Amino acid sequence: MRGELVSGAGNLFVLLDARGGTSPSGEEAGAWCEAAAGKVGRVADGLLVLCEDGGATRLVVWNSDGSEAAACGNGLRCAGWLLLRETGEGEVVIETRTGPRGVRGETQRGGAKHLTADLGVVQVEAVADELPLVGTERAAWRGSAGNPHCVFLVEDVGDAGFRERGAALQEHPLFDGGVNVGYLAEEDGEWRLRVFERGVGETEACGTGAAVAAHVLHEALGLPFPLELELSGGRLRVSQDPHGGARVTGAVEHLGSLSLEPATRTST
């Protein structure tokens, strides 16, 4: 089976089109993600699988550890890239665990496609009283964009203890089932975001994390939408639709193809 290597603002994925065929399981995600290292020098963050669902196209997202992601903003944009290229239309709708989600665009900027994905309504709430702050953390917010997030307003996203903090919070009683952790700081006039994703570890970017972080800035500091965030792998723009739902825009790049033999795929 052949997969496509795609990057959404730095989030690296293997994208498989399983429509009309057998959909890979989470047990195969690790082998596909590791195969990406042979092509681009690093393990992919997740496996994106497009499958048929009663005449619609559904996206299933497996983290590199084989767990299923409830939502994935950059993965949604990457899947949209393939479907938009296939249909030639300006917008496609993809079924996800959180409902139908639209993806649109094809604007060429600096050699990369810029696509926008609808993520639905984002909810945030302050939780500093329930979650003691450490290091450079100054405020803590819990949020949901279909998956759980905890965003800290910090002095410096380069805090040396970030990864340990992200790993430790996976076992915190406030977050049943783990959480995506973000460090958010204003540096040199820009808002920078660093993300530790459950089931993956630190990633170059996170679409739902950017959406939640932008809503924290809106609620905590009164900053208006749209908001732009700089992540390790690239820039994401967060806006709102007329109904208050989040929209995330950023680059999508196709980095090539790869394939795995069945024996390799099932060996993990």
Image: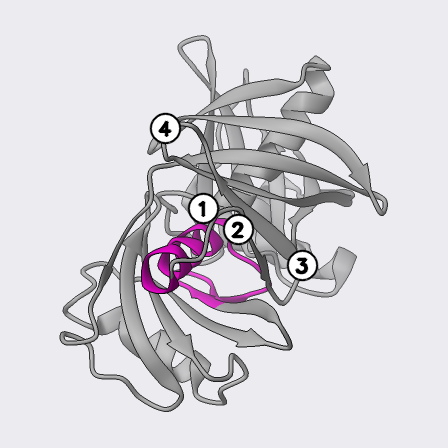
The range drawn in magenta is 195-221
Residue 216 drawn in magenta: yes
**Foreground pick, 197 / 185:** 185
* Residue 187 to residue 82: above or below: below
Task: Single out the mark in the foreground, 1 or 4.
Answer: 4
- Disc 4 marks which residue? 243
For the residues bearing labels 2 and 3, Cβ distance under 8 angstroms: no
The quarter of the picture where the N terminus appears is top right
Mark number displayed over residue 62: 1
* Residue 85 to residue 108: above or below: above
- Whole-number angstrom distance, CA of label 1 to CA of label 2: 6 Å
- Whole-number angstrom distance, CA of label 2 to CA of label 4: 30 Å
**Foreground pick, 27 / 136:** 136
* Residue 10 to residue 154: above or below: above
- Whole-number angstrom distance, CA of label 1 to CA of label 4: 29 Å
Q: Amino acid at mark 1?
A: Trp
- Disc 2 marks which residue? 46
- Dot 1 or dot 3: first in sequence order is 1
Q: Amino acid at mark 3?
A: Gly
Mark number displayed over residue 234: 3
Left or right, 123 with respect to 129, comes to right
Residue 238 spot, x, y in % from top left = 52, 47
- Dot 1 or dot 4: first in sequence order is 1
How many neighbours does mark 4 have within 10 angstroms: few (below 14), some (14-19), or many (20 or more)? Answer: few
Q: Residue furthest top?
A: 55
Left or right, 29 with respect to 126, comes to right
Counting labels gives 4
For the residues bearing labels 1 and 2, Cβ distance under 8 angstroms: yes
For the point 30% across and 76% down, the residue is: 139
- Whole-number angstrom distance, CA of label 1 to CA of label 3: 22 Å
Task: Single out the mark in the foreground, 2 or 4.
Answer: 4
Q: Amino acid at mark 4?
A: His
